[in-house]
Image: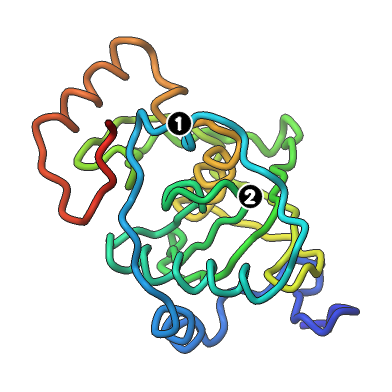
Amino acid sequence: MAEHETGQRVDDEGFVVDTEDCEERERTHRERGTARPITVVGNPVLHRECRDVTEFDGELAKLVDDMFASQRAAEGVGLAANQIGVDLKVFVYDCPDDEGVRHVGVVCNPVLEELPAERRVLDDSNEGCLSVPGAYASLARPDYAVVRGQDAEGRPITVRGTGYFARCLQHETDHLYGRLYIDRLSKRERKDVLRQMAENTPRYETVPND
């Protein structure tokens, strides 16, 4: 392991270490935060690109705490700010990879790296979304992802994931640019997902669309 110039722990390839002290870090955020209801498909904030984070202050720290609390209350593995109605490019995650290794962190202003062709191995596992409660669909995504952004203090970070965690990084970054996973489905598949959603009662509090 190496030390980032900002003091963050990074591995030998420069990727942030998000697998250490996961339980303590998640709990600290969650216990300071307040769970908020989840916005669902159709809410305008989910369907437009969010604003860049420019102020890395106490207000942002409070938002991150609330996001961890909301994520846990909804039993999610990732949550974007617009999923609790906040128009900012921030997401949090508490997600295992395919080896069962837990990853916990926060990314502001994420940018997903374009993978070279030789790294693009697609995984067509099922995908779901807290903003499309009770529904799932198969969606092919690369099984490796790299996201560059900033942490909650504004320091540059690079996060990488494989398998399920790679899917999470792509899914949450999509959210902040106004795209839900169902927007990547065919019309028929999307219709089926919305039918599943209509037939199920959310297991967590949601914001009704007027």
Extreme-front residue of the structure: 210
Quadrant in which the N terminus appears: bottom right
For the point 22% across and 55% down, the residue is 205
Residue that mark 2 sits on: 89
Mark 1 residue element:
helix
Q: Percent x, y for residue 164?
A: 44, 52
Quick check: marks 2 and 1 in contact, CB under 8 Å? no
For the residues labelled 2 and 1, the Cα–Cα distance comes to: 15 Å
For the residue carrying disc 1, how many other residues have a C-alpha within 10 Å: few (<14), some (14-19), or many (20+)? few
Q: Is residue 168 above or below residue 117?
A: below
Instruction: Mark 2 or mark 1: name the one nearer the start of the chain.
Output: 1
For the point 43% across and 48% down, the residue is 83
Q: Percent x, y for residue 92?
A: 52, 62
Tell me: 116 left or right of 179: right
Quarter-wise, where is residue 12 in the image? Answer: bottom right
Mark 2 or 1, which is nearer the eye?
1
Quadrant in which the C terminus appears: top left
Label ID, residue 150:
none
Q: Amino acid at mark 2?
A: Lys
Tell me: 151 left or right of 182: right
Residue 61 or residue 74, whichever sits in front: 61
Q: Amino acid at mark 1?
A: Pro
Q: Percent x, y for residue 101?
A: 46, 71
Q: Is residue 16 above or below residue 37?
A: below
Residue that mark 1 sits on: 44
